[in-house]
Image (cartoon, rainbow, N blue to C red):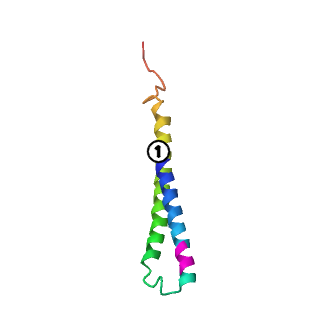
Amino acid sequence: RLLSIIGTIIAAGGMTFGTFLLIMRFVRGSVWAANGVFTLFAVLFIFIGAQFIGLGLLGEYIGRIYWDVRGRPRYFVQQIINGK
């Protein structure tokens, strides 16, 4: 869950930064964001956030499988043949 929360925060920060860059591009003009490095950082933050969200969901899924399997016996005896 922690990775999902961190991923959501990072992705939201990337989207906020991207929105800020878009607004500044319209306000200040094309000279302000000529290099595009900051736009690359905004897109990078969005994708890194998405990866963290995916890892958080995967970890949650594996954790639930672990807790489900933990309570079961290792094997089941289906039939006893010639037993006493």
Give the residue at the far front of this rendering: 28
Q: Is residue 51 left or right of residue 19?
A: left
Residue 11 position, x and y percent, is 51, 62
Name the dominant secondary structure of the magenta segment: helix
Give the residue at the far top of this rendering: 84
Residue underneath mark 1: 62
Residue at (48% x, 54% y) in the render = 6
SS for callout 1: helix
* Quarter of the image that includes the C terminus: top left
Residue at (51% x, 69% y) in the render = 17
Magenta segment includes 40: no
> With respect to residue 47, does 2 lie above or below?
above
**Closest to the observer, 50 or 42:** 42
Residue type pointed to by label 1: Ile
**Closest to the observer, 58 or 9:** 9
Residue at (44% x, 69% y) in the render = 44
Residue 31 position, x and y percent, is 48, 87
Residue 70 position, x and y percent, is 45, 33
Q: Label 1 neighbourhood size at 10 Å, few (<14), some (14-19), many (20+)? A: few
Q: How many marks?
A: 1
Residue at (42% x, 17% y) in the render = 82
Please provide the residue range marked out in magenta.
20-24
